[in-house]
Image (spheres, rainbow, N blue to C red):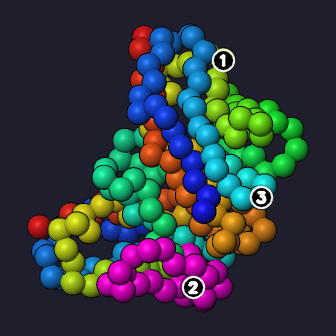
């Protein structure tokens, strides 16, 4: 079965510093990977996806993610964090057995301090 | 384009009652998926509909059901509510099978007392 793991419950970073939110995956076959962000009392917002192609994927709000097949990782990155980036971040993999079904990680809370 | 809308946004029900939640996908999107989000279990897939047909179902009891209408709007129903059904229920829409991004609504916060 497809799965993703987010090893950190929380990541703290100072505004202006680079940030990384980690995600590793376990899939059979080629992975379709996603990052979503959730702000308080809101639904999930799509940030970016990896389907195929370049290992560095650029997404919304200045975020990017690096797909690493040998390490089975798909870490989310941003060169310079903003206080407004503070939110809950979810990594997800598309379940290959069923169409649009996404399997989510447990989420990582990002806290950017001024 | 308007985003995914879900109604109601908040709901309080009593144990044993039933509830119906509604989701209107982005115009032109034919696939609607439902997820349950709780602090303990995280985000879990409930089911997916495409062109009025259920294509996939998660590991939830039969008390959870859904349907999709010809205009792609979807409803999910939970019968005989239990305290553990308290959660944020999220609906997501996408164009269809060959597209990958899903766009989520704001969710319906269900509280069962």
Residue name at image x 58 percent, y 20 percent? A19
Residue under numbered circle 1: A79
* Chain label for disc 3: A
| Residue A26 spot, x, y in % from top left | 64, 50
Q: Is residue A5 magenta?
A: no
Do the residues indicated by labels 3 and 2 lie within the same chain of the protein?
A: no
Q: Is residue B64 magenta?
A: yes
Taking depth in this image into account, of B52 and B80 the one nearest to the observer is B80
Quickly name the residue at label 3: A29
**Is residue A62 shown left or right of residue B103?**
right
Whole-angstrom CA distance, mark 3 to mark 2, is: 25 Å
Q: Which residue is mark 2?
A: B54
3 or 1: mark nearer the eye? 3
**Is label 1 on the same chain as label 2?**
no
Residue A24: x percent and y percent?
A: 61, 40
Circle 1: element type = loop
Cα separation between marks 1 and 2: 42 Å
Q: Secondary structure at mark 2?
A: strand
Work out how far the residue at label 3 is from the one at label 1, CA to CA, in angstroms: 31 Å
């Amino acid at each position: 079965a497809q799965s993703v793991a987010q090893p950190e419950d929380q990541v703290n970073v100072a505004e202006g510093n680079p940030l990384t939110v980690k995600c590793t995956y376990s899939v059979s076959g080629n992975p379709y990977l996603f990052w979503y962000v959730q702000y308080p009392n809101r639904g999930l917002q799509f940030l970016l996806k990896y389907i195929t192609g370049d290992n560095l994927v650029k997404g919304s709000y200045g975020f990017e993610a690096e797909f690493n097949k040998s390490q089975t990782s798909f870490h989310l990155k941003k060169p310079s964090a903003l206080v407004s980036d503070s939110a809950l971040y979810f990594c997800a993999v598309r379940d290959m057995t069923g169409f649009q079904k996404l399997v989510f990680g447990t989420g990582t809370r990002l806290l950017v301090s001024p | 384009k308007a985003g995914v809308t879900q109604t109601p946004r908040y709901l309080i029900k009593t144990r044993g009652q039933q509830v119906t939640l509604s989701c209107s996908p982005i115009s032109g999107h034919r696939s609607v998926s439902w997820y349950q989000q709780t602090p303990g279990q995280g985000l879990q897939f409930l089911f997916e509909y495409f062109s009025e047909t259920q294509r996939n179902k998660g590991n939830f009891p039969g008390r959870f059901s859904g349907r999709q209408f010809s205009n792609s709007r979807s409803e999910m129903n939970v019968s005989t509510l239990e305290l553990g059904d308290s959660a944020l229920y999220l609906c997501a829409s996408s164009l269809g099978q060959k597209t990958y991004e899903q766009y989520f609504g704001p969710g319906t916060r269900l509280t069962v007392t």
